[in-house]
Image (spheres, rainbow, N blue to C red):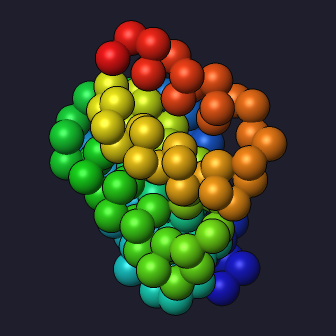
């Protein structure tokens, strides 16, 4: 379990550092997926983060969809887990999906009403909308 966690973290670092070709990174993520524990929220968030980072690097919709899927899987297990909620919030924000940002932001503020960053993003969306 710990080995899988460290491996996925290593892969994410390679993506963020732009240290390997996309095809190699995708293969590493696929390998990691075969080794993670499917009910371990840390593993699921980490793989979601890998796909999120790869999407930001390449713009490939498939990676966006996979990141979203992993974050949502985490929320099925733990609906209040901040890593998945903020992961979705940032994913949707980067993609310019204002409606999804608002929906996710409202969910975050129900749990953490003092989150000024989220409130500020929502205020900006409402001003421009």
Indicate the position of residue 93 as horizontal and vertical percent values.
43, 31
Indicate the position of residue 76 as horizontal and vertical percent values.
45, 80
Q: Residue at x 19, y 40 (%)?
A: 61
What count of labels does the image hold? 0
Q: Is residue 19 visible?
A: no
Q: Residue at x 38, y 80 (%)?
A: 34
Quarter of the rendering occupied by the N terminus: bottom right
Q: In the picture shown, does residue 76 fall above or below 5?
A: below
Q: Quadrant of residue 45?
A: bottom right
Q: Residue at x 47, y 49 (%)?
A: 104
Query: Is residue 119 toward the left or the right of residue 68 in the image?
Result: right
Q: In the picture shown, does residue 9 fall above or below 16?
A: below
Query: Is residue 46 toward the left or the right of residue 23 in the image?
Result: right
- Which residue is at the far left? 61
Identify which residue, 72 or 60, lies in the foreground.
Answer: 72
Q: Quadrant of residue 114?
A: top right
Quarter of the rendering occupied by the C terminus: top left
């Amino acid at each position: 379990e710990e080995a899988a966690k460290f491996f996925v973290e290593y892969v994410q670092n390679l993506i963020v550092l732009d240290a390997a070709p996309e095809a190699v990174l995708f293969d590493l993520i696929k390998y990691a997926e075969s080794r993670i524990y499917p009910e371990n929220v840390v593993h699921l968030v980490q793989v979601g983060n890998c796909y999120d980072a790869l999407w930001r690097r390449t713009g490939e919709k498939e990676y966006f969809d996979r990141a979203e899927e992993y974050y949502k899987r985490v929320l099925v297990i733990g609906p209040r887990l901040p890593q998945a909620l903020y992961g979705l919030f940032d994913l949707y924000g980067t993609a310019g999906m204002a409606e999804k940002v608002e929906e996710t932001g409202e969910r975050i503020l129900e749990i953490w009403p003092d989150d000024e960053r989220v409130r500020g993003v929502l205020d900006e969306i409402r001003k421009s909308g």
